[in-house]
Amino acid sequence: MSEKKNSAGWSRRDIMKAAGAFSAAGAMPMFFSRGAWAENNFRNNPGKAASIKLGFNVPQTGAYADEGADELRAFKLAVKHLNGEGDGGLMNTMKPLSLKGNGVLGKKVEYVTGDTQTKSDAARASAKRMIEKDGVIMFSGGSSSGVAIAVQSLAQEMGVVFMAGLTHSNDTTGKDKRRYGFRHFFNAKMSGSALGPVLKKEMGTDRSAYHLTADYTWGWTQEESIKETTEGLGWKTVKTVKTPVGAGDFSQYITPILNSGADTLILNHYGKDMINSLTQAVQFGLRDKQVNGKTFEIIVPLYSRLMAQGAGKNLKGILGTTNWNWALKDKGSQAFVKSFGSEYGFPPSQAAHTCYVQTLLYANACEMAGTFYPPEVIKQLEGFKFDGMGNGATEYRAEDHQCFKDVLVVRGNENPTSQFDLLEIVQEVPRAQVEYDAKIFGGELGPYKV
Amino acid sequence: MDAIFLQILNGLDKGGAYALIALGLTLVFGTLGVVNFAHGALFMLGAFCSVSFYKLLTLSKQVKDESITFFDAFKEQPYLEIWFGDYGTTIIDLAVPLSILFAIPVMLLIGLIMERGLIRHFYKRSHAEQILVTFGLAIVLQEVIKSMFGANPIPMPAPEIVSGSAPIGVLFGMGESVVYPWWRLIYLLFSGIVIAGVFAFLNMTTYGMVVRAGMMDRETVGLLGIDVERRFTVVFGLAAVVTGLAGVMYAPILPPDYHMGMDFLVLSFVVVVVGGMGSLGGAVAAGFLLGILQSFASMNEVKSIIPGIDQVIIYLVAVVILLVRPRGLLGRKGVMED
C-alpha cells in the first residue's frame, strides 16, 4: 500500500508520529514532577498568600461552653506562640522542634472560630463553613466524641486535616478512624488500663460493679473498656444501664442500685451528666452504704477539673483518670501553665492542653514536610515521636493516629489548698502500661489522597 | 416491691417539680391568655437566686497560695465564719432554705417587670407572636445568667442535717435498706405546701375569687368595675414566685446551670397540655401522673420489654390525650377543642 504525501512531503503517518513524539516530550517534565503538581492542587492551598487560616471549632454554647471557651483560649495562645509572640510556651520545651516562631513555613497564622453546640450536625455545618468559606487549612477542637467522629469523616471527605480536641471514645481512633483525623487525647481503653492496678490495690479483687452509662459512642466504649478491666481483676458486673444524655434527674436510674447487690458504681458520664448523677448518687446515700461487708465506692473513669468544680465536695476521694493536669511538675507542663496562667489568670484545663498541643503538632508537621500538602503533612505526623509537651515521651501511632503517652490516675482532692486544687494525682501511669494493639478496634484509615 | 415503692417516690418528687412549674404556666395562660415560653427561665432564675444568695453568704477572705506563681490561687474562708464562728457556718449551711426569703421578693419583682415591661404588649397578639417573643426573652435571660455565672453547673449543698438519706423503708415495714434522700422528701412536702397555698389563695380569698371569675369571663368581671388587668399582673407575679421557689428548692437536687430552664420548659408544656390548658387542678394532676409514669418507664424491667420507653413515655401520653381528649384531663370544654 502506498502512502499519499502532501506538498511538503509529510504523510499522515509522519504527522501522527511527530504529534506523538511532541506530546511525549511535552509531558516528560510533568511525569517527573507529578508530586509537585499534586502538591499545588489541594483544597485551600495557601499558595503565595502571606498567611494561613486555622479553624477552631469548639462548643461556645450549650453544656460544654466553659470547656469550649478554655479550648479557644489555648488555641489563641498557640497561634500567638506560632507567630513568635508571647513567651513561646511549649515551643521552648518540645523536642524535636522544627518551628521557628515565624508562623508556619514563613506564613503568619490566622484563625476563625465556630460553634459546635456539642451537636454533630451543627459541628459539621460549622466545619464545612470554615473549610469552604473561610478556607482553613486545618481545623481542631471539640468536647464530644460524637462530634469528633462526625467532623473527622467530613475532614476525610474534604481533604482537610482535623486535629481532634477532647474526645475519649475508643471509636475515634478505632472503628471510625480516618486518615485525616488525629487524636492527642487519651481514650477509654487507656483509662481502663491505667485504672486497673490502682483499683486492685485500693478496692481489691472481689467487687460487684453497677454501670450507669451515657447512651452514645463515648459511653458505650468506656463501659466496654472499664468492664473489661474490672472483670479482668475478678470483679463481677451486676448490671449495665444506659441513660439518656442530658437526663438531668437520674433518681430513677439510681434507686435500682440500692438493692442490686452492687458495692461499686461506675459512672460512665461526663460533664453535666456526671455532675448531676454523682450529686444525686451521693444524696441517695450510696457513699455511706455498706454492701457485701465493704464500703460502697463510686468511680468516675474520666475526670476533668471543670467537672470537678461543678461536682463540688461530692467528688472528694473518688478515683478516675485524666489526660493531663496543671499540677504536673515536668518542664513542658510548667511551661504551658506559666504561659496560660500569665495570659488568663488561671490554670489551663486538660481540654486546653490537648488543643494547644494539637495546634503545635500540626504546625510542626508542616514545617517538617516543607509543605501544607495534606498527604505529606499526614505522613510526618504518622509515627512522630516527641517529648516535652507535658505527658512524657509520646508517639502518634501511624496505624490509628492515636497518641500514646503517660496517663494520670487522679482522685477528688480531700484537702484542696486552693480553688483550682481539685484533683490529686494518685499515679502517673507509664505509656507502656496503656498501649494496645491497634487491630483490636478494627476500622480503616482510608486514602491519603481524596 | 421496694423498687416500685422507690419509683413511686421518685415520680412524686419529679412530679412535684413539674406540677409547680406547670401550675405557674397554666395560671398565666388561664388569666392572661399568654403562652409564656419564658416560664422555664423563671425556674432557672429561681435556682440562681439560691446560687446568688449562697455566694453572698460565702463572701470570703482570700489567702494566697504562695507556692503558685503563674496565677492567683487562693484558699478561701467565708467572712461569716471568721466573724461568727460556728454560727456563721450554720448560716451558710442553711443557704438554700434561707434563700427562699431572698427569692420571693426578687421573683415577684422579676415577674412584675416581665409582665409590665414586655408581655402586656402582646396580650392581643397571636399565640405565635407570643411564643416568639417569650422564647426570645428566655434566651436573653439565659445568656445574661451565662455571662454572670458561666456555663458549668454550680454545686448547691443541701443543709448538712438533711444531706443524707432517710430510712423511709422502716416506716413502711420494708427494712432499713430502703432509703430516700431527705432533701427530696422535703421537696415533695414543699411542693405540696406551695400547691395547697396557691389553691387556698385562689379558692378561699376574695382576691382569688375575682381572679377565678376573670379566668372564666374577663369581660363581665371588668363590667363590674373591677380592674382585672391589675389583678392579672399580680397573678403573673405570683406565678413567677411559685416557679422561682420550685427552682430555689431544686438547686441541691440539680446543680443549677444557665440552661436548666429550657430542659424543664418542654416538659412543663406537655404537663399543661395533658392537664388541660388553663386548668390548675389539671396541671397538678398531670405533673404527678407524668412524673410517676416517667419513673416507672425507666425501670430496667420495663425497658427490657420496650427499649427506650423512658425517653418517650410522656410524649406518648401527650399524643394519646390530645387524640382522645383534646382539652386535656381536666381542661374546660371548648379550650383547645376547635
Image (tube, helix red, strand yellow):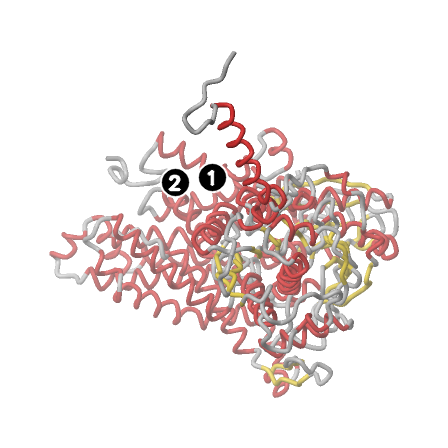
Q: Is residue A449 visible?
A: yes
**Residue on which the image places disc 1:** B314
Dot 2: element: helix
Marks 2 and 1 close (CB-CB < 8 Å): yes
- Work out whether residue B42 or residue A178 is closer to the camera in this orientation and state it: A178
Q: Position of residue A16 (x, y in %)?
A: 50, 27
Say which of marks 2 and 1 sits in front: 1
Task: State the residue at coordinates (62%, 73%).
Answer: A340
**Residue on which the image places disc 2:** B274
A21, above or below B96, in the image: above
Task: Give left or right: position of A109 versus A427.
Answer: left
B191, above or below B333, in the image: below
Q: Position of residue B51 (x, y in %)?
A: 52, 69
Q: Where is the N terminus of chain B found, in terms of image quarters? A: top right
Task: State the residue at coordinates (66%, 73%).
Answer: A89
Q: Earlier in the sequence, mark 2 or mark 1?
A: 2
Which chain does the residue under circle 2 lie in? Answer: B
Tag 1: residue type?
Answer: Ile
- Work out whether residue A424 or residue B127 is closer to the camera in this orientation and state it: A424
Q: Are marks 2 and 1 on the same chain?
A: yes
